[in-house]
Amino acid sequence: MKKQEIINWLKCEDDAELEELWRMSDTIRQNHVGNVVHLRGLLEISNICARNCHYCGIRAGNDELGRYRMPGDEIMECVHEAVDYNYGTVVMQAGEDFGITREWMTTLIRRIKKETKLAVTLSLGERSDDDLVAWKEAGADRYLLRFETSNRTLYERIHPPLPGIESDRLALLRRLRGIGYEIGSGVMIGIPGQTWEDLANDIETFRSLDLDMIGVGPYIAHRGTPLGIDDVAFMAPEGEQIPNTEEMTYKVIALARVVCPSANIPSTTALATLNTATGRELGLSRGANIVMPNLTPKKYRAMYEIYPAKACIDETAADCRACMQRRILSIGREVGTGRGDSPNRGKRKAA
Ligand code: SAM
């Protein structure tokens, strides 16, 4: 699919034509990754963050937020819960928390690998190559790092670097692949200042990075952030701004499936936040094949407030497990049991 065609789909508002896009992405999903929906248990291990991203509620400058870092033993209890729920993967996500040291994380990954058969995914932000190599050697399998937007000017405006360190997530993703991780990335949809051309470039970037996983979700304004306070000031000119809507998110999921047929694509929590009733199911029916039920203990969930009114905030891990299973079965799909490794990576290895 050429860039102009991607833009045409992004701009399309005709329901009958969009049905064609949903059908196409669902067929490609079925042919390339099948009927199974893999479950990844998401554990938000720390909301401490050194960064000041202009969009994110856990940014360092948000003084209104209580902060936490889960102790290793508590993380291990949740990891064993993931095994009990038959999840194939645990995803450990955090703010960019340098209190999570190389050694501490290495010990934790080794422990998980010794005590379980789970695949381990990390989403800990921009860390040094030495950290990333150590964690890979300890047994980590995958790394998630959204590049947020491929428009460098917009990226620099919303994602200030740490003092003296350039932030280049695209370069880091390539290094992660070189180190041996399955790599996942993605963008927010409807960032103030993001244009049709930008979003089409993002989708083309999914293809050029040959991603193993693509996670996309709507940008949701948070009042404790510079963008959330005054997003109007940052909007693209009339007619150029991408709306941060549910429908735009389905379009990006569907187009991601078209350009990367074998990637693992989650139906995300941000999408479920815009439509709690059927957002997850519609994402799954329009190209997605992964869900990430939350494993984070309830006492921490409200503190991992990257955007407000996040779905599943009042639920326990057991609630999330039951809810996801019900939703998957309700649309005639099967619940995955294995690790759900990237079929994309398998193909690359064979080539
Ligand atoms: N610190 C790690 C990182 O930066 O990759 C992982 C945690 S970060 C909170 C995870 C993702 O949350 C970001 O990549 C971003 O896309 C998303 N996010 C943050 N603020 C958001 C907002 N206001 N609306 C939607 N998504 C948001």
Image (cartoon, rainbow, N blue to C red):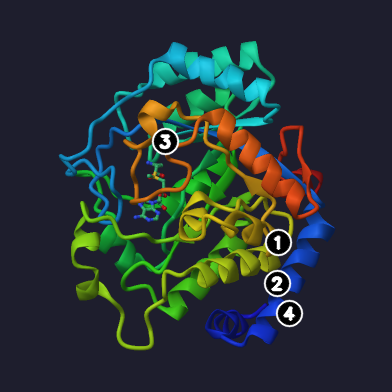
| Residue at mark 4 to residue at mark 3: CA–CA distance | 38 Å
User: Where in the figure is residue 31, as x and y percent of width and height?
Assistant: 84, 59
Marks 1 and 3, how far apart at CA: 29 Å
| Disc 4: residue Cβ within 8 A of ligand 1's nearest atom | no
Q: Which residue is mark 3?
A: 124
Dot 1 or dot 3, earlier in sequence: 3
Residue that badge 4 annotates? 20
Q: Confirm if mark 1 falls within 8 A of ligand 1.
A: no
**Residue ID at (34%, 37%):** 302
Q: Which mark is residue 285?
A: 1
Crowd band around label 1 with a 10 angstrom C-alpha radius: few (<14), some (14–19), many (20+): many
- The residue nearer to you, when weighing 5 against 216, is 216
The kind of residue on which mark 4 rests is: Glu
Q: Secondary structure at mark 1?
A: helix
Q: Are marks 1 and 2 in contact (CB under 8 Å)?
A: yes
User: Circle 3: is it few (<14), some (14-19), or many (20+) Cα within 10 Å?
Assistant: many
Are the residues tagged 4 and 2 within 8 Å (C-beta)? yes
Identify the residue shown where x is 46% and y is 51%.
146
Q: Can you tell which mark lies on residue 22?
A: 2
